[in-house]
Amino acid sequence: PLRWESVAGDRLYKSYQDFQPDLMLFIQEPTYGNRGNKVLEKITVPKIGWNVEAYEEIERLKESSQFFDAYNLFNQNAVALLNKELIPAKYLCHAVNPKRFFPQPDCQPLYDICFVGNFSPWRDEVLNAALGVTNNVALYGPNWVGNRKSKIAPKMLAIIHKGNSIIGNELNSLFSSSKVVINVSRVRDSAGLNMRFFEVLAAGACLLTDTPPELERHFIPNRHLATFSNIDELKRHLTALLADPSLRQDIGVEGYKHVVAKHTYLHLAEHFLLQFDALVHRESLPGLQANSLRPTSLDPEQDPK
């Protein structure tokens, strides 16, 4: 009973009883264990989940989604796996707060490139290749310095690594003061657009990224952002971008206009509210209870009314 999962589940249920919400929204999968899952079953208001992990293990996906009345994932492959099991799930990407990430035209370029993220072998390979183009680099993230798996020389890592974390205004300023922001998926060829796609574009910066399968659902390559699919493309495109300030500016402006028009938290909230309206509408049908809702189809683009 004192395991943290059990304590979290008990506190969740007490909060539910105290607050009496009309809707419960879970970002990430709940990790309350068997005791906590029974708590989720006792919660009778509509429950909407949003999973922003890249894993694609079907049993874990089934377990994570089973107590929700509407379920969203940022990984389109995971959505397809659940749908194949006749479990309704919707694709939903990240969004950005344009009051936190925004252009800073007065920022002067300090770095040719920056990268923010945890160490992974694919990220290390990309960054090591980028250092062949320029060593004016700002790197933020944990597990880089002293990592024996890194192909980057320890002396170079000590120079370019600026810290384990950077957030808020400092992160926005970093994007604005870098000629090119490089984004790399943690695992090569994995699905799901991470936060950089939305934060960097909202900052008006020029983004050079690898290509998760969802990318062209939202962005036009070489218009809203620049892309690479292998190391040779990375070096070629990075060299071209660093040599052409007008090209970087054009991509930054187009990316900014697009992301603030399509991918803010306002759009995210509208998606959840449409799902909630659909669940409430179905709840009003005879014989349906709130804790037995499992819509066979749910399109947040359509107003159920």
Image: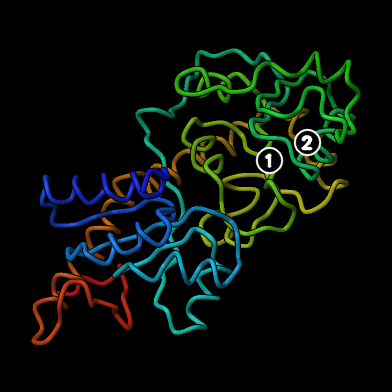
**Which label is found at residue 208?**
1
What kind of residue is marked 1? Leu
Residue 32: % across, % down: 40, 53
Q: Does residue 76 sit above or below 246 in this rendering?
A: below
Residue positioned 49% across, 76% down in the render: 82
Residue 147: % across, % down: 82, 29
- In which quadrant of the rendered view does residue 122 lie? top right
Q: Does residue 12 sit above or below 182 in this rendering?
A: below
**Mark 2 vs mark 1: which is more N-terminal?**
1
Label pair 2/1, CB-CB below 8 angstroms = yes
Residue 111: % across, % down: 70, 18
Judging by the rendered image, the residue that carries numbered circle 2 is: 238
Task: Give the Cα distance between marks 2 and 1.
Answer: 8 Å
Q: Is residue 254 left or right of residue 32?
A: right
- In which quadrant of the rendered view does residue 226 lie? top right
Residue positioned 50% across, 24% down in the render: 167
Residue positioned 27% across, 48% down in the render: 10
Residue positioned 86% across, 18% down in the render: 156
Task: Choose between 159 and 244: the one closer to the eye.
Answer: 159
Disc 1: CA contacts within 10 A as few (<14), some (14-19) or many (>=20): many
**Which label is found at residue 124?**
none
Q: Helix, strand, or loop for circle 2?
A: helix
Which residue is most to the bottom? Answer: 287
Residue 117: % across, % down: 64, 34
Q: Helix, strand, or loop for circle 1?
A: strand
Q: Is residue 167 left or right of residue 226?
A: left
Task: Choose between 257 and 101: the one closer to the eye.
Answer: 101
What kind of residue is marked 2? Leu
